[in-house]
């Protein structure tokens, strides 16, 4: 995270660690700005991303498998389904980096591109 967004890394106050999480649409009311998410595991590629409502009719899916994605969790968002396709030991872990208690940042776009370093 420090290499991708050093400003955010210096302000990050919280890290959530999840296992096997999917679904559960919600809004992060305590966040004061966007978050970064990273997913790892043997779940199928192209599945298990972060879905976020960009508008009333548009839902974007951010692929976070083995990569960081920046999303504003103050918009409705959830983890997309992933199918085990018969595999019994399917795993999905995620790290969510966010900040609370710092200066509030006005909500901007629901998803962000991350510049190449």
Image (spheres, rainbow, N blue to C red):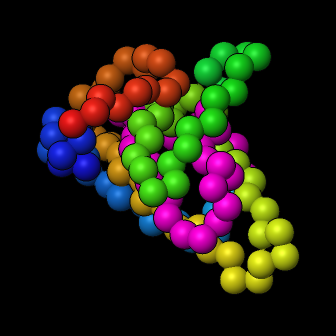
Q: Residue at x 49, y 27 (%)?
A: 111
Q: Position of residue 91 (x, y in %)?
A: 62, 74
Quarter of the view holding residue 8: top left
Q: Residue at x 36, y 51 (%)?
A: 97
Q: Is residue 79 visible?
A: no
Q: Position of residue 52 (x, y in %)?
A: 62, 33
Q: Residue at x 32, y 23 (%)?
A: 105
Residue 25 lies within the magenta run: yes
Above or below, 107 against 27 in this view is above
Horizontal side of 100 relative to 60 (left or right) equals left
Above or below, 33 against 48 in this view is above
Horizontal side of 103 relative to 113 (left or right) equals left
Q: Residue at x 71, y 20 (%)?
A: 58
The quarter of the picture where the C terminus appears is: top left
Quarter of the view holding residue 81: bottom right
Q: Is residue 56 visible?
A: yes
Q: Nearer the viewer, residue 27 or 42?
A: 42
Residue 89 lies within the magenta run: no
Above or below, 9 against 33 in this view is below
How many tags in the picture? 0
Q: Position of residue 57 (x, y in %)?
A: 76, 16
Residue projecting furthest to the bottom = 89
Q: Nearer the viewer, residue 25 or 111?
A: 111
Horizontal side of 18 relative to 84 (left or right) equals left
Q: Which residues are magenta?
A: 23-52
Q: Position of residue 85 (x, y in %)?
A: 83, 69
């Amino acid at each position: 995270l420090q290499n991708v967004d050093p400003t955010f890394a210096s302000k990050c106050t919280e890290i959530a660690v999840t296992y096997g999480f999917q679904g559960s649409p919600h809004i992060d009311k305590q966040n004061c700005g966007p978050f970064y998410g990273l997913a790892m595991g043997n779940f199928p590629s192209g599945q298990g991303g972060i879905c976020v409502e960009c508008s009333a009719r548009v839902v974007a899916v951010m692929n976070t498998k083995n990569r960081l994605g920046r999303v504003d969790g103050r918009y409705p968002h959830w983890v997309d389904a992933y199918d085990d396709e018969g595999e019994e030991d399917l795993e999905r872990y995620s790290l969510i980096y966010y900040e609370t208690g710092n200066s509030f940042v006005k909500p901007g776009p629901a998803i962000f591109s991350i510049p190449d370093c």
